[in-house]
Amino acid sequence: MAIQRMDNVLIVVDDLDAVVSFFVEMGMELEGQGPVEGRWVERVVGIDDVVARLRAHGADLVGAVAQYEDVYRLCYVRGPEGIIVGLAEEVR
C-alpha cells in the first residue's frame, strides 16, 4: 500500500535525527531539511509492516489497529518526542 497523502505536518523536535529515522522507516524519503512542499512519497508499505519497523525506533501503538467497515485499517503510532502519526491502509 503506497502512502497516498499527508493532510498536514507540523513537527517541532529536539532530536531531528531520531525523527527523520522514524519517518524513513514509515516509508518516506528525506529530500532535505526544512519546509517541504509537493508530492514526495511513492513507496509501498502496509500498516502491520510499518508498525513492526517503527517499533525498532521506539514507536508504540496508541490503542490498536482498527478496521473501518471494509474500507480502511487505521491506527495511531507514538514516535520520538511524543509525536503521534495516524496511519491508514485502504483494504482491497
Image: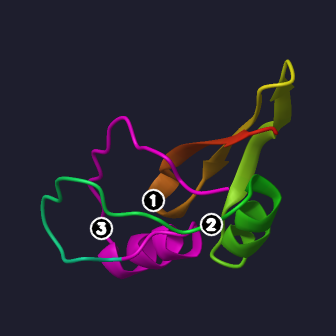
The reply, left or right, for residue 89 in relation to residue 85 is right
Q: Amino acid at mark 1?
A: Glu
As rendered, which of 49 and 41 lies closer to the eye?
Answer: 41
The residue that mark 1 highlights is: 81
Q: Secondary structure at mark 1?
A: helix
The residue segment tinted magenta is: 1-29
Q: Residues within 10 Å of mark 2 (few under 14, many from 20)?
A: few
Q: Residues within 10 Å of mark 3 (few under 14, many from 20)?
A: few
- Does residue 64 show up magenta in the picture? no
Q: Secondary structure at mark 2?
A: loop
First of labels 3, 2 by sequence position = 3
Q: Is residue 6 above or below residue 80?
A: above
The residue that mark 3 highlights is: 14
Q: Amino acid at mark 2?
A: Val
Q: Is residue 27 above or below residue 75?
A: below
**Mark 3 or 2, which is nearer the eye?**
2
- Does residue 15 show up magenta in the picture? yes
The residue that mark 2 highlights is: 44
Where residue 46 appears, as percent x and y from the top left, is: 74, 58
Where residue 81 appears, as percent x and y from the top left, is: 45, 59
Instruction: Kindly report the distance in space between the C-alpha atoms of the residues bearing marks 3 and 2.
Output: 29 Å
First of labels 3, 1 by sequence position = 3
As rendered, which of 64 and 74 lies closer to the eye?
Answer: 74
Name the residue: 53% across, 45% down.
Answer: 84
As rendered, which of 10 and 29 lies closer to the eye?
Answer: 29
* Colour style of the rendered protein structure: rainbow
The reply, left or right, for residue 42 in relation to residue 70 is left
First of labels 2, 1 by sequence position = 2
Q: Residue furthest front?
A: 92
Return the mark for residue 19: none
